[in-house]
Amino acid sequence: MYKQAIVVRKDVRMGKGKLAAQVAHASVGAVLSAPESVVQPWSSEGAMKVVLKVAGEKEIRTIAKAAKAEGLPCFLVKDAGRTQLKSGTVTALGIGPAKDSEVNKVTGKLKLL
């Protein structure tokens, strides 16, 4: 079974629409960095996603580093600064798609958003 995890910072104040856009950026960015050999089975299984939360930037960067160390496809979202946030603000992280157990190695202790 395959899944994708999206990790969002809770200390960044964003409107609901902005949050949804950041989650979408994280998901698409991670998928584009994943090998087709993983994207295809993940997609055919229903493209499972979970959205998780972290307290702040330090934690999200630590998780991104752990995901890269595990060889997982990942994408760290840095806002362009056109609306609510300063340019370069880290908002979200997409991890996977990858095997469920591999994603859980780096996100298993996080809580749902």
Image: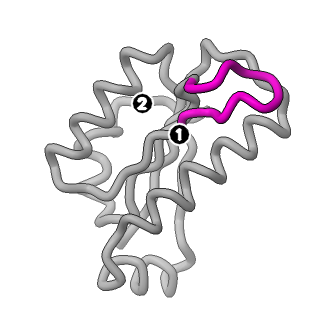
Q: Amino acid at mark 1?
A: Val
Q: Amino acid at mark 2?
A: Leu
Residue 63 at x, y = what percent?
31, 32
Residue 83 at x, y = what percent?
82, 29
Furthest-left residue in this view: 69
Q: Residue visible at 65% across and 17% down?
A: 12
Q: Is residue 85 magenta?
A: yes
Q: Residue visible at 18% across and 55% down?
A: 71
Q: Residue visible at 73% across and 16% down?
A: 13
Q: Which residue is mark 2?
A: 110
Residue numbers of the magenta segment:
78-88
Residue 49 at x, y = what percent?
54, 58
Vertical placement of residue 87 versus 6, above or below = above
Q: How is the image coloured?
A: one colour
Residue 43, numbered label? none
Q: Which residue is mark 1?
A: 77
**Cα–Cα span, label 2 and label 1:** 18 Å
Q: Residue visible at 66% across and 42% down?
A: 22
* Relative depth, front residue between 73 and 6: 73
Label 2's element?
Answer: loop
